Image (cartoon, grey):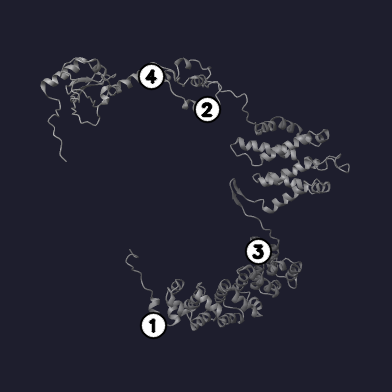
Amino acid sequence: MFWKFDLHTTSHIDQLLDREDVTLKELMEEDDVLQECKAQNRRLLLFLSQDHCMQELVSLITTEPPADLEERSRFKFPNVACELLTSDVSLINDKLGGDESLLEMLYHFLEQDPPLNPLLASFFSKTIGNLIARKTEQLITFLKKKEGFIGLVLKHIDASAMMDLLLRLISCVEPASLRQEVLQWLNEEKLVQRLTELIHSGKDEERQSNASQTLCDIIRLSRDQANQMQENVESDPLLAVIEMQETVAGLLKNMFEGERSETSIVNGTQVLLTLLETRRSGAILTTVGVLEQPLGNARLHVVRLVAALLQTTSPTICQELCNLTTMDLLLDLFFKYSWNNFLHFQVELCVSAVLNHPSSEELSGPGLQNHDTKPLFQKCRLVQRILDAWEENDKIQANGGTRRGNMGHLTRIANMVVQNLEKGPVQTQILPEDCRGRWESFVDETLRETNRRNTVELVSTHNMHSSSEDDDMEGPFPNDLSLQQTFADYQIQQMTANFVDQFGFNDEEFSEHDENINATFDRIAEINFNLDADDNSANAAAFEACCKERIRQFDDAEEEEDIWEEKEINYATQAKSRTRFGVSQTLEGSSRSSMENGDRQQDHGSGSDDGDDSEHKSANPGWTADFRDSGGTGVSQSASGWEGPADTVEEAAKNGDAQGTGWANFTEFQPFDG
């Protein structure tokens, strides 16, 4: 509802800006001046970016306010001025970083005599830090022109804000090339040496503490940035100078030279401890839990290097690695990091290289037999480690735990040990006596069972039989190509009259399960679909007789008549009755017109049928044209399913003549004119 009716309030800043005589402090009195500035109020930014306003803002953060003011309001305007200058507004940043007179005003703050006001020093440090991040090149160019800049900063190092300023110069400069230039410039200004000299018993505690903390922060920041850089960059000159022996010697000299003080010893020792710090990886969350101390990429690559050296089969290298107890350390890592498969594979390669070391006959010099394998079994206690790790894994799994991730590689190492011990009695003697019984039991039972489970049996399709519970019929199935050919032949063959009777299956064919399933398909292939042209079957004779009967009326003497002569045609209705089986019986009465010769007539309703009339009875649905006399004779359709009783036909004809109804008479029909 608030936004719907546009009920936003108007800032009082705009009302003040409408006045021509408004001052900067009047605007700074408003509580929402900083909010309007960050909201990019155009009128306010144009007012603040004026020269006199910018100079007044810089003056507020670099000049000590009058001491007679109330403490609550004394640093109110300097605080608001600092927030406005560091509000990260591009218009203000451009004005402050591009105007050298404003930078000179800021730089003059460092030229004051110590001690600096801590609050004003923090305002100054925050403003310079914002320019380092936003206007890096302009500010660095300006500071390089000032020869005494580093000296002035160290002069006021007792203020913690100056320490923050140095750290911003070291860590907040971008890009990397410009940062390297700044580090080189600071190194040329002897920043590290000057900070080391401040850790002296003759200096006050604040200076010593801030100088020591600055050196420690430089060491940590430089190392962290070196680790984060993906590409190869030049070394940090400041870190290199701190790690130099001369620098450490000078620090120790300052700590103990002259009158010893607890402050100098503590601060100097803090720098030495920071130099001795090693970067340890923090705990990481993995899929199997929290890993407190990761293996790390560096140690993994060292293991890969050792594996590559052992695979060279150089006697000197192998002997030296054995003297250094390298294999013992690798086995420790193998069992400690049980889920690092990259490490497991490399350690397996190392053990394989040692166990498969060439024998004395294959080596040029005698006496090198067992120089590598004997320490592996005795000093490194490889067999005992395998047995202990296996028993511990069995206990974990017995309690419902997860199988360790290195058990697969451990199984392969155990198999390599078995193969090495089978080489001869000399190899058997190097096995410690206290574990020979355990090892033999482990090999005969546990390891053999594990190898059996890990063995992959190849799948074979020979001699495969169905299950005893399978009720499906067994038998050779025909080839797919032969079935397709049989079906194609079946489609192009002509079907005989008795094909339907022969097609299908008999009940006897399903009585035995061991019959050949091809029997039915063979019968189909044996059916003869060919018809002999000379085959005068009964069906063919009946078909021809039916055809002749249909066209007989056109074969008599009347075919010589003029087919275009107009004749009177009478149509009779059809009376249909249904039998109990749904078969229709048709009664027809037709009137025939006189023919041209007029000498063939029959009596109406005679009820007797000529020989010709009996032959003309056929199963013909619809209307039947008859060119005889108009005398109506009941004609019945004589086809199967259509012929009815003769008496019924005759009675229907008689009733039609007697009653004079149900018959159409077209004798008095007059044709339509045009």
Using a 10 Å C-alpha cutoff, classify the residue at mark 1 as few (fewer than 14 neighbours), some (14 to 19) or many (20 or more). Answer: few
Q: Does residue 653 appear left or right of residue 171 in this picture?
A: left
Name the amino acid type tagged 4. Answer: Ala
Contact check, label 4 and label 1, Cβ < 8 Å: no
Task: Pick the residue in front: 175 or 443.
Answer: 175
Contact check, label 4 and label 3, Cβ < 8 Å: no
Where is residue 178? Give x, y as percent. 64, 71
Q: Label 2, on which residue?
A: 485
Q: Is disc 1 placed on a helix, strand or loop?
A: loop
Q: Quadrant of the C terminus?
A: top left
Which image quadrant is residue 578 in? top left
Task: Pick the residue in front: 551 or 333.
Answer: 551
Q: Which mark is residue 8?
A: none
Contact check, label 1 and label 2, Cβ < 8 Å: no
Q: Label 3, on which residue?
A: 220
Q: Is disc 4 placed on a helix, strand or loop?
A: helix
Q: Label 4, on which residue?
A: 540
Q: Nearer the viewer, mark 2 or mark 3?
A: 2
